[in-house]
Structures are given as C-alpha cells and as structure tokens.
Amino acid sequence: MKLLSLAARSMTTRGVGSLGNTYSLNQVQTGSFQTSLSNVLESRVVFNLVSGGSAPNLLQNSVIHFTFTPDGELTANVVQMGTHCAGRP
C-alpha cells in the first residue's frame, strides 16, 4: 500500500462584515491518498475567520472521504462538518 500526504494553505483573504467588523479568512486543506485494492482519498479543510475587532472568531472544519472501487466507481461521504465560535481575538 502506498500513502501520499498533501498539505497546502489554499487561501487567505480579508473583508468587512455587514456591521463594519473586519475579518481575515484563512483556509488550510490537508489530504492523504492511499492505494491498495481500492483507492481512498481523505481531505480535511479548515476555514478560520478571524475578527479584527471585538466580534468573535468563527471556525469551520470538514472532512471529506472519497473511495474509488477497483473498477473506477467513485463514492464520496462527508464524514464530519461543523462550525463554531472560536472566541474573541
């Protein structure tokens, strides 16, 4: 079995919310790919929305799992997805 791991910081951007709060958005995505009788790809994505003022920060996590059968059929299942307030800066 082969295992390939990936790590990338995909996006960083800034913006202003509807109440005038400034935010910085950082997206980090990691993944792994393993080959055996079937191919499996798992991707983890984290969105970290950081407030520039007194508004709370927001964190969203998701894990997506893909499986390719030996005959090439793709199945996808979101294993975990959640959003929560991460406190104040």
Image (spheres, rainbow, N blue to C red):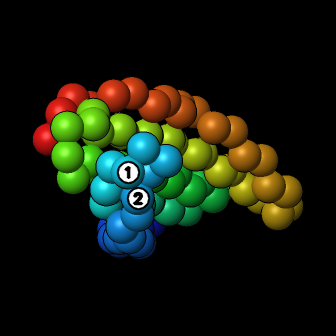
Residue appearing at x 72%, y 46% in the figure: 76
Label 2 belongs to which residue? Answer: 16
Q: Please tell me in which quadrant of the rendered image residue 9 appears.
A: bottom left
Residue 68: x and y, percent? 73, 56
Callout 2: few (<14), some (14-19), or many (20+) C-alpha neighbours within 10 Å? few
User: In this orientation, does residue 36 appear?
Assistant: no
Which of these two is toward me, 73 or 83? 83
Residue appearing at x 20%, y 46% in the figure: 53
Label 1 belongs to which residue? Answer: 20
Residue 89: x and y, percent? 14, 41
What amino acid type should be assigned to the residue bearing mark 1? Gly
Query: What label sits on residue 6 in the rendered view?
Result: none
Callout 1: few (<14), some (14-19), or many (20+) C-alpha neighbours within 10 Å? few
User: In this orientation, does residue 51 appear?
Assistant: yes
Q: Marks 1 and 2, Cα distance to the nearest angstrom?
A: 6 Å
Residue appearing at x 51%, y 42% in the figure: 63
Q: Disc 2 on helix, strand or loop?
A: strand
In the depicted structure, whether residue 42 falls above or below residue 71: above
Kindly report which numbered mark, 1 or 2, lies closer to the viewer in this rendering.
Answer: 1
Residue 15: x and y, percent? 40, 63
In the depicted structure, whether residue 57 falls above or below residue 10: above
What amino acid type should be assigned to the residue bearing mark 2? Val
Which of these two is toward me, 11 or 50? 50
* C-beta proximity under 8 Å, tags 1 and 2: yes
Q: Disc 1 on helix, strand or loop?
A: loop
Give the total number of marks visible in the rendering: 2
Whether residue 48 sits left or right of residue 78 in the image: it is left
